[in-house]
């Protein structure tokens, strides 16, 4: 059996995005390409919640136990999951750009493996809608009430928020982001110019 070459391409990866990167135009801008090699599906992550980051328009996700302490209340069933987009086909270069964007290595985010549940078949990124109403509708599909019966889960990378003290008790809304804040992210530059 031969040893794998260091030059061999690595298997494409999957990631779950739950905030700014749910918008295809922002994702394409951050990875620096049109995403034609990517496929996506709306999905949800159980056991986590998505909160507003203080003074920012982007969110952070934390485990449910931390969220209940932060919110200081019992959460509704719909608040005990995070809606987002699972994207497959990411290259190592894509992930490097995403890690840079999420500032991996700082104290703000960490990339971890989680299991998410797709809500629809995967489709090419080129078919992803960008209009406000269509984006909101895509990410408003219903989540099964009895999540314990779900057999289909996909292991993916996602970015969890580490600085719980910098989160608001209020949950973050993708609908509000699309309507009020998305355009300011269209020209975001994560690459530091020397």
Image (tube, helix red, strand yellow):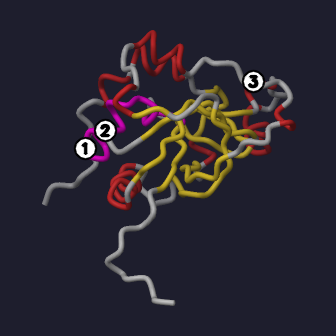
Residue 33, which numbered label? 1
Left or right of residue 122, residue 128 in this image: left
Inter-mark Cα distance, 1 to 2: 6 Å
Return the disc, 2 or 3, that comes first in the chain's sequence: 2
Residue topped by disc 3: 78
Q: Vertical placement of 30 versus 110: above or below?
A: above
- Magenta stretch, main secondary structure, is helix
Residue drawn at 80 percent across, 32 percent down:
72
Label 1: few (<14), some (14–19) or many (≥20) C-alpha neighbours in 10 Å: few
Q: Which residues are magenta?
A: 18-35
Residue topped by disc 2: 28
SS under mark 2: helix
Q: Vertical placement of 94 versus 180: above or below?
A: below
Label 3: few (<14), some (14–19) or many (≥20) C-alpha neighbours in 10 Å: few
Task: Answer whether labels 1 and 2 touch (C-beta < 8 Å).
Answer: yes
Residue drawn at 79 percent across, 44 percent down:
65
Taking depth in this image into account, of 105 and 9 the one nearest to the observer is: 9
Return the disc, 3 or 1, that comes first in the chain's sequence: 1
Return the disc, 1 or 2, that comes first in the chain's sequence: 2
Taking depth in this image into account, of 68 and 91 the one nearest to the observer is: 91
**Which percent across, then down, holds residue 108?**
51, 53
- Residue 107 in the magenta stretch? The answer is no
Q: Vertical placement of 68 versus 3: above or below?
A: above
Q: Quadrant of residue 167?
A: top right
Residue drawn at 48 percent across, 55 percent down:
13
> What residue occupies the far front of the structure in this picture?
1
SS under mark 1: loop
**Which percent across, then down, holds residue 91?**
38, 57
Inter-mark Cα distance, 3 to 1: 34 Å
């Amino acid at each position: 059996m031969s040893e794998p070459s260091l030059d061999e391409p690595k298997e494409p990866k999957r990631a779950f995005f739950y905030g700014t990167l749910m918008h295809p135009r922002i994702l394409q801008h951050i990875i620096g390409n049109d995403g034609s090699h990517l496929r996506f599906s709306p999905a949800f992550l159980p056991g986590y919640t998505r909160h507003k980051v203080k003074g920012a328009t982007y969110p952070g996700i934390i485990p449910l136990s931390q969220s209940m302490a932060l919110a200081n209340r019992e959460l509704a069933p719909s608040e005990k999951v995070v809606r987002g987009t699972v994207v497959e086909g990411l290259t190592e270069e894509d992930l490097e750009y995403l890690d840079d964007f999420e500032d991996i290595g700082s104290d703000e985010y960490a990339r971890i493996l989680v299991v998410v549940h797709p809500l629809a078949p995967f489709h090419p990124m080129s078919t992803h809608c960008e209009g406000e109403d269509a984006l909101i509708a895509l990410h408003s599909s219903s989540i099964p009430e009895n999540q314990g019966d779900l057999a289909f889960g996909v292991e993916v990378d996602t970015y969890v928020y580490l600085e719980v003290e910098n989160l608001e008790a209020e949950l973050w809304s993708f609908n509000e982001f699309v309507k009020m804040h998305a355009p300011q992210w269209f020209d975001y530059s994560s690459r530091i110019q020397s």
